[in-house]
Amino acid sequence: MNAAAPHFSGSYAQGDVEFLLTPMALEPIRDLAEKERLIQSGQRHYSEMLSPESLPSPAYLALFQSAFEANRTQMARDCLRLAALIAARRNGPVTLVSLARAGTPVGVILVHLLREVFQRECRHYSVSIIRDRGIDQVALRHILAQGASAESIVFVDGWTGKGVISRELRHTVEQFNREHKVTIDSGLFVLSDLAGTAACAASCDDYLIASSILNATVSGLVSRSVLNESIGPDQFHGCVYYAQFEAHDQSRAFADALVADAIALAANEGLPAAVATDAPAMAARSQAYMDSAQKQYGISDINLIKPGIGEATRVLLRRVPERLIVRDTNAPDVAHLLLLAHEKAIPVTMEPALPYQAVALIRSALDG
């Protein structure tokens, strides 16, 4: 049925995840300004192209390690809380479906916690979802064909920014349900719900989830998902596997450390209460900030505003930033962003009243 290798797990152990992605060769777009122009003019969709990935500098890797050490307890506790929320909302076996690739490390941690702490049978797939193009329906059909019940499926991601992906998920899964006469829950489960659009979240804090700092080397050596003309109608969406980075991979060590931390927390503190966050309050905060930022910076396209540390990191790593906005330049959680902004000569604005720790603005490629 599919050109993807069976049981493709990237650099993770086979039982940790099955990427429902088609490994492919794809030459990256090295001129980021040209890539930005193609995306913003509508000539190419962002999912058709990849920016080049390179290994982090020693200084940047040191920031990743310090961020991991500073926030590992909070992330481990949030993973444990999210696992508790999932266990409370699903009966019987659980089918985790993480959204590649920010959701993949979280899904790998959760599959261990659900099995080892909550004694639940659990399988983990990672699939592609693309803004304006939806979730990979070939992948969803494959999951159901493997025997997973629609009721067992839980969609997982790292965080929400503006809520674009959680809305895309809801819309396209509900469409899939109508077409296939199934009842998959279209809600998204995340560690941190900044937009108030997740169905379930462990937190609504804009803290540094350390896996957001790195690209492939913390996500199973897999690229962001790709959907271009080379992907056939019966194939999973594509990806590039970065075998050349294997000696520098952090993926398994990162997940293993957080699993161990979360298991220790469960043993020492007991299981957390399965209580979700206040989504309506977060949604109101998100909408108020987006309205304000559009007026303040004269931005008509909200896709050029990326709130939260995770989204700001993505912009500085692979887009063409216009500006980095931070609440506090001395906050350890934004140190890696300030380093990237310095390296790329991006202006930094400090706004003490910012409702997030960081926001990145993407440069308009169409002005003038």
Image: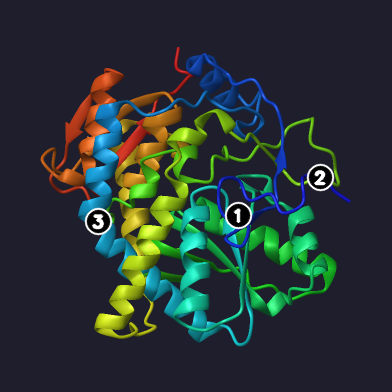
Mark 2 residue type: Gln
Q: Which residue is drawn at 28% across and 28% down?
A: 58
Q: Distance between the residues labelled 1 and 3?
A: 29 Å
Q: Distance between the residues labelled 3 and 2?
A: 38 Å
Mark 1 residue type: Glu
Residue 23 in the figure: left or right of residue 97: right
Q: Name which of mark 1 and mark 3 comes first in the sequence.
A: 3
Q: Name which of mark 3 and mark 2 comes first in the sequence.
A: 3
Comparing 196 with 74, the one in front is 74
What residue does disc 2 label? 235
What residue does disc 3 label? 71
Say if residue 195 shows up in the picture: no
State which quarter of the image contains the C terminus.
top left
Q: In this view, does 62 lie above or below 195?
A: above
Q: Judge the density around disc 1: few (<14), some (14-19), many (≥20) Cα neighbours within 10 Å.
A: some
Comparing 29 with 36, the one in front is 29
Which x, y percent locates residue 79? 39, 68
Q: How far apart are marks 1 and 2 (CA)?
A: 20 Å
Q: What element carries label 1?
A: helix
Quarter of image, res 329: top left
Which x, y percent locates residue 88? 49, 86
Which x, y percent locates residue 244? 55, 28
Q: Judge the density around disc 2: few (<14), some (14-19), many (≥20) Cα neighbours within 10 Å.
A: some
Which x, y percent locates residue 363? 40, 24
Q: Judge the density around disc 3: few (<14), some (14-19), many (≥20) Cα neighbours within 10 Å.
A: some
Comparing 74 with 11, the one in front is 11
Q: Name which of mark 1 and mark 2 comes first in the sequence.
A: 1
Q: What element carries label 2?
A: loop
- Tag 3 and tag 2, C-beta contact below 8 Å: no
- Tag 1 and tag 2, C-beta contact below 8 Å: no
What residue does disc 1 label? 168
